[in-house]
Amino acid sequence: MACSYPSAALPSPSHPMAKSGYGKRSAGDEHPHGDPDFAHLSPRDREIAVFVDHLGDGHAMGYKAIAAVHPRYGQQAVRTSLKRITAAGHLRHIREHLTVEDNSMRWVTRTYWSRTPRSPEWWAEFVRERKGLDVTDQYESGLARAAEAAPAALDEQPSEEPSDEPGDAYRTLADLRDADPRMALSASDCRSLESLAAQWLALGATPQEITKALTDGLPPAVTNPGGLARKRLEDKMPPTKAKIRQKTGRRARINRVIMACVTCDADERTTEIIDGICRECHAEIEADEAAEMEGPPIGYVPETFLRDPADDTGVVDVTHWAAELRRAARLRPRAGRDV
C-alpha cells in the first residue's frame, strides 16, 4: 500500500548522487510502504522522512542536499529533522575500515536507512555483523551491503595476528633453485625481491608465470642470480592484467566498524554515540525543540516594536504599521499598499 502522507515534494530523478561512501543504503528487512511507517514523527519530521525514504540507493541525503531541492524547508529545519529521525531509529552513519587485496587500507562512511524504526540494540547488532564481511570497490557509491559481494572472495575469517609463514611471493622465489639451479637465490635475495614478486601476483600473474619469466633464456653461467632476478622482475612487470583486474574490482574486507554521529560526523573513537548522535548534537536537538515550543505565534510583534500598545492578543496589522513608518520617514507610499 502506498504511503498516503501528504508531502510538498518527493525526490526527482535528478536528485544528486553522493560522493563515494556517503550515499543512501538500505539496512534491509523492511516492510512495504504503508501509512504507519512514520506515524510516530512530528508532521515536519514525517515529511522529511518520506522524502528520504523515496530516495534511491546511492543518492545524497545530507541536510544541505535535501534542503537545496525541498520547496518547504531550509538547511536548519532539515538538519534538525534528520537528527530527530536518527534518534527515532531510522538512520545511522557507520564508518567501516577496509583492507584491500593490494594491502592498502581506507575508511569509508556508510549512510544506512531503515523505513522501520529500529532499536539501539538492533543497530548495534547491525554494526557487529559488518565486521569481517567482503566488499569490492565496484560499489564505489557506497560499497552497498556485504550480501552483494562475492562470498568466497577472501578467506572465511581475517587473520588477527601476522603469520610467520613465508608468503606465496617468497616461496616462488625460493623455489627457483628447483626450476633452474643457475637461479638459486639466497634467503637475503628472496626477502629483497619479495615485494616485486608480490606485485606480480597482485596483478594476476601465477607463480608458474613468475618462474618462467625468471628462468627462460638464461646464459650458460649466472654469476649474480639476485641481480638478474631483480632486473627481470622490474622490466617484465605485466601491465595488461593490472588494468583488467582493476575493472573487475579489487577484493576487500571490512575489519573494523564504528558508529559515527549523523550530524557532525564525529565517531566512537573520540566521543560517545547515543542513538546515532553524539552528546553535543543531542543537546542541540533539545535546544531546537525548546525553541520551537517557546516560539511566539505567527503575526505576533513584541510591544517594544510598536508605537502604541497592542490589543489583548498581541497580534497587529504589520502592513498598516509599515505604512505608518514610511509616512513618518517622509518616504513615498508603495503603490497599491500604503493607503
Image (spheres, rainbow, N blue to C red):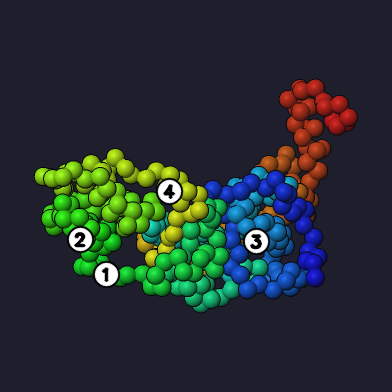
Name the amino acid, label 2. Asp
Task: Tell me how far mark 3 sits from mark 4, CA to CA.
Answer: 63 Å
Query: In the rendering, which numbered label is found on residue 293?
Result: 3
Residue at 73% from the left image edge and 49% from the top image edge: 12
Q: Are marks 2 and 1 in contact (CB under 8 Å)?
A: no
Name the amino acid, label 4. Lys
Please give the residue where the numbered disc 1 appears in the rendered image: 161
Task: Tell me how far mark 3 sits from mark 1, CA to CA.
Answer: 55 Å
Q: Nearer the viewer, mark 3 or mark 2?
A: 2
Mark 2 or mark 1: name the one nearer the start of the chain.
1
SS label for mark 3: helix
Q: Position of residue 98 (x, y in %)?
A: 41, 59
Task: Tell me how far mark 2 sits from mark 1, CA to CA.
Answer: 31 Å
Instruction: Say few, some or many: other residues with alpha carbon within 10 Å of mark 3 (under 14 / 14 to 19 / 20 or more).
Output: few
Task: Tell me how far mark 1 sits from mark 4, CA to CA.
Answer: 31 Å
Q: Nearer the viewer, mark 2 or mark 4?
A: 2
On-image quarter of the C terminus: top right
Residue 286 visible somewhere in the drawing: no
Quarter of the figure with residue 266: bottom left
Query: In the rendering, which numbered label is found on residue 241?
Result: 4
Mark 1 or mark 4: name the one nearer the start of the chain.
1
| Residue 130 against residue 69 in the figure, above or below | below
Mark 3 or mark 1: name the one nearer the start of the chain.
1
Instruction: Say few, some or many: other residues with alpha carbon within 10 Å of mark 4 (under 14 / 14 to 19 / 20 or more).
Output: some
